[in-house]
Structures are given as C-alpha cells and as structure tokens.
Image (tube, coloured by chain):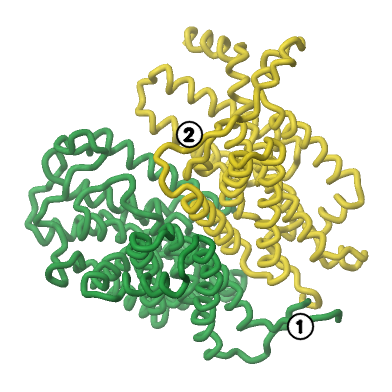
Chain colours: A yellow, B green
Amino acid sequence: MMDFLANLFDMLGSASFWVATLRVATPLILGTLGVLICERAGVLNLGIEGIMVAGAFTGWLAVFNGADLWTGVLVAGLVGGVFGLLHAALTVWLTVSQHVAGLGVTLLATSLSAFAYRVSFPQVSTPPTVTAFAPLEGLAGLPLIGPVLAGQTSLTLLAIALVPTVAYLLYRTPMGLALRMVGENPAAAEGQGVDVIAVRTGAVIAGSILMGLAGAFLTLSAFNAFFFNMINGRGWICVALVVFASWRPGKALLGAVLFAAFDAAQLRLQQAGGALPYQIYLMLPYLLSILALIVMARRAAYPQALMKPYRKGER
Amino acid sequence: MRLESRSEYSPRAMLFAPIVAVLVTLGVCALLVAWAGAPVGQTYALLFDGAFGSRFALAETLTRATPLILTGLAAAVAFRARLFNIGAEGQLYLGALAAVAVGGMHGGSTFDLPLPLLSALMIAAGAAAGALWLLGPAWMKLKLGVDEVVTTLLLNFVALLLVSMMLDGPMKDPLAMGWPQSVALDPELEFSRLIERSRVHTGLLMACGLAILVWLIERFTTFGFALRAVGANHRAAAFAGLPVGRTVLLCALLSGALAGLAGVGEVAGRTSYVTTDMSPGYGYAGIVIAMLAGLHPLGVLLAALFVAAVQVGADSMSRVVGVPNFIADVIVATALLTMLVATLLTRYRLRWGRT
C-alpha cells in the first residue's frame, strides 16, 4: 500500500505525466466545449464522432497537400462547420429526431472521410505523414508549469484559452444570453425578439467547428498521420463529459483534464506491464464515462429545451 | 421557411417515402462516383449486377442480409418504444461469443447434452447475452434518467474489448497459429445450408421468422400495444395505467436478444468462430434499416435486403472500376438522412416566406 502511494506521488509529481495528460485532454476539451455550445442552445449533436473524423482527415489532407499547419486547422474547422450546418438544417430547420440525425451525420462524415481517403490514396499500405506542430520548447523556462507546457503544442494552448473565452461569451454577452435562452425556453426567447432558429443554427455551427478542431489536433499535433479508427469513441466520451460538467465550460475543462489524467495513468500502468490483460485498461475510459453519467444523473440540470424541436406557432 | 402540420395522414406517402429517399440518395452519391473518376451509369450497373446479377451474387446478398435483418429488427423494436438502442454492434459480438462459449470445441466447454438441446442452449445463450448487455442501459434510463444513446454507444467499445480479451485468454483457439480468433464451434452445431453451393444458411429463415413474430407481437399482443403506446407518449401511457417501466425493460430484452441472435447466426452460419472484425458495422447499419423501414418489422426485411445489396454490390463493383467500396457506407448513411427528411415531409408541409 505504501509502495502504491509512493508510486502515485512520484507519478503526480513528474512533468512527463502532466505532459501526457494535457495531450490526451486537448481533443476532449475542444470536443466537450463544442458539445456544450450545441446543447446549451437546445441541440444534441451526436455528429461529433464523425465530425472529429472529418476534421482529422481534412486538416491533415490540407497540410499533406502543401498548406501550412494553421491553414490545415482552419480547413478542419470549416469542414466541421459545414457538417454543423447540415445537422442544424436537419434538426433545427426540419426538426427531425436529434438522436438519429446526429448518428446519421456521424455515419456520413466517417464514411465520406474513408471514401475520400481511398480515392486520394488508392494504393498505400503505410499512412503518409506530415510534419506536425512542434512542442513549444521556448516555454520551458517558466516556473513550475514550464516543463509541462514545453511538451505541448500551440493547439493545446488554444484549447485551454478557449475555455474562458466560451465562458465569457456564454455568460457575459447578449449573444450568450440569447443562446442560453433558446436552450431553456425558446418560446420566451422568441417573445423577446430572439430569432430562435438563427441562434440555434449559429450555435450548432460554432460547436461543430470546435469538434473539427478537436479532430485536427489528433492528426496535426498528437500524431502526424490519419488512421481510420483514430477517433475511437472520443466524441461519445465528450458527450458524457458535458453531463459530468453540468454544461459549464470551467467544469468541462476540469472534467476533461481529470479524465485525461486517469487515461494517462492507465497508459502508464499498461506500459509497466500490469497484471491484468491490456484490454481491461483500454475499457477504463469508456467505463469511467458511464460512471460519470451515473454519478451526475441525479444532479444533472439539463438545458430545459434540450432535444425539443422548436416549431413556430406550435405548442 | 416554416413547417405546417399536415391535417390528413397519408399511408401512400409513407409508402413512397423510402423510395424517394433511396432515389435521392443514389442521385447524391452519383456525384461522388463521378468525382472518383468512374462512369456513373456503369458503376451503378455493376453495383446492381454484383448484388443480384448471378446466382452467386444473389446468394451473397442473402447471406449478408441475414445479420442485417436481425440488427434492423433490434433497432426497430427498440425505437418503437423510444428506447434508442445504438448498441446492437456490441450485443451482436456478445451473442456470438456466448454461442461459442456454449458450443465451442477443443478447450471450449461443449456440454454433454443431446444435439438438439445443445443447439437450443447455444441459441438461447446468444440471445441472453445480447439481452443482458442492453438491460443495464435500459435500467439506467428508467431509474436514473441517463441517456441510453451515449451508454449503449460507449458499451459497444467495451464489448469489443471484452471479446478481444476472451480471444487472447480463455477462448483463444490454440490451433489458430496466433491469429486472434476463438475456438471453433462444434461442426454439428453449425446451421445447415439453405441453398446448395452457397453460403446462405438457415439463419435466414430464423431472421425472417423473427420478423414475422415481432410484427405479430407488436400488432396483436397487449405488450405490443403497450410498446407502441409508450413510444407514442410515455406520460399518457403511464396515466392510462400501462406499466411503462416493465414495457421498456421487456422491450430492451427483446431488442438485445435480436441483436445477440445476429451474432449467433454469423458464428453458426458463416464463420464458425469469433473474430474482432466479424461485423463490418452490422449494428450501426441496423439503425439505418429500421429507419428506412419506418420501424415496421416486415419493412425491415426489404430494407435489410437493400443495404445488403449495396454492400455486396459495392464490393464487387470496386474490384472492376476504381471506386472504393466505402461508397456503400456513404450510400447507407445518406439514405438514413434522406429518409429522415422524407418521413418528416409526410407529416409536415414546408411553407416558404414570412408568416
């Protein structure tokens, strides 16, 4: 037991552990913020899993074809936004089932990416690579957090900076107020002169752009190539993390980092050759997400109009 | 733009919706085929030919349709009660695993039972494994209000890892030369061939029989009535004194069992052992099939045949012209979205301009 605690403290005190944690957390932070923005406006976006695949693929493809890294990120965001527009058209304008439309967007974005990859690279056995974002070694000199930040790329800093930005926009601007209103009581918002359809459409597009960026992080920073199964449920985990975060950006950051710390810890245990089959360790993130849902279930304060379509003049 | 509720319900429109959806889908996907640099007409002709053009093609399509009918039914029956079971993929794998656990050879645990009994036990085990895997999410939905879509999706990954773990461990085939596959099923337990010199097996009869059975249950039993009532409006159903919780749990058991049976059929009818890549997304395709069928159990038969034809036809087409067979997944996904819109338009009319 003492051994275990000593090891635990060693791990928590090592910079490499926190470097790994932040790297795992980055796509989760971006994806969770994306889901949060959509859900705060009353729209469930299960397209996330596929939008992350599409963002990962198109961002990488742009860089592979000679664009610079930030253009790749921009492309991934744009593609995410386009799929967001599709989801908004289906769920906000046409008011079809948000569950099924989201799954449809995921299936479409995933299969389109796979199709486009095969058309672009008909005969490759090993995935082609690009030069990914370099770690910010210039930050190593900062006290305390320097060694941790030096292992990260600009995209991670962008993700962390987006948390207070989203929080400010949601809670301190008229736009954020309108967004939260259409997610709680769209009829009342309409009465205040808010265009419910427009605000929800904008929120879904904005959230989906972040999901696209989350995907691009994986191909342009965490790795340097695109694989078919690289998202591997990360999108669904983000959907669970939003519930865990009670739809608050700050808690979303906390949830994503906490989750990533567990994931980084299980990776270490796995590499240290734990006594259990490696599959058990790989199951942990998914089981942890379900556990988070169970723990928060009683306290979950869902946006009141979540998954409720709004049709003008219909009660 | 706004939506206006249609006053009259038109069964004819409901019937046309899937046809229109499929035609629009083929039109949209023609653009992708053209982008891939292939002649559109020839590609679709080859796709059709690859699915129905010969005795072999037709047999392959029917073989592919067998698990798809079952996962389609699993989704259709659950969605009818508004239980969004997206976990058919995982339930299928566990059904397959349970079937081999009961009927596996050398190192497996073949029980000392007469053959018909053992066969029944194998099928029951597969159904039970799928059913139990969905019971957890259904219970969490009822008791805790946890969204079952997310839990069933996450459990798909857990199920696949569980299968992978069993294939590395207790159910590893010692004769597989290190390939990750399970012990083989006792050959006596394999489903017999339905058509000679093909891979079509009696699992197809089981799937069709179950489609009819599910339709009879939904249409003519008290449980079926409760199922439809809970799906239409669960508050009204509860107010009318229907046991909402029990209905949802029973529905979960039925849906999970159907998906589990899809796994049993694959093992007993086709592969005879479990691998971690035995399903190319049958569970997810089942959702599309259920929606294309308008959740009607008999419609599932047709919709599953369509999806099977697209998948089998695309495989054969991609070998001739340079269009990747991923086009099948794109067609299936697009069909889901167009069907959603088509169904909506049978209930609502689009009005343009300001009110």
Mark 2: secondary structure:
helix
- The residue closer to the viewer here, A104 or A53, is A53
Circle 2 chain: A
The answer to whether residue A259 is visible is: yes
Query: Mark number for residue A284?
Result: 2
Determine the residue positioned at 29% across, 38% down: B166
User: Image height check: is A10 above or below B191?
Assistant: above
Amino acid type shown at disc 1 = Arg
- The kind of residue on which mark 2 rests is Leu
The percent coordinates of residue A153 (x first, y second) are 68, 26
Q: Camera-side residue: A5 or B195?
A: B195
Q: Quick one: label 2, few (<14), some, or many (20+) residues within 10 Å? A: some
User: Which residue appears at 72% of the width and 44% of the height?
Assistant: A74
Residue B300 in sight here: no
Position in image of residue B76 (x %, y %): 45, 69
Element carrying mark 1: strand
**Which quadrant would residue B354 be assigned to in this image?**
bottom right
Residue at the spot x=61%, y=43% of the render? Answer: A238
Front in this rendered view, residue A300 or B109? B109
Residue B245 located left or right of residue A146: left
Distance Cα–Cα, label 1 vs label 2 = 50 Å
Residue A34 drawn above or below residue A8: below
Q: Residue at x 35, y 61 (%)?
A: B315
Would you place residue B185 above or below residue B83 in this image?
A: above
B118 left or right, relative to A252: left
Quadrant of the drawing holding the C terminus of chain A: bottom right
Q: Which mark is residue B351?
A: 1
Q: Chain of mark 1?
A: B
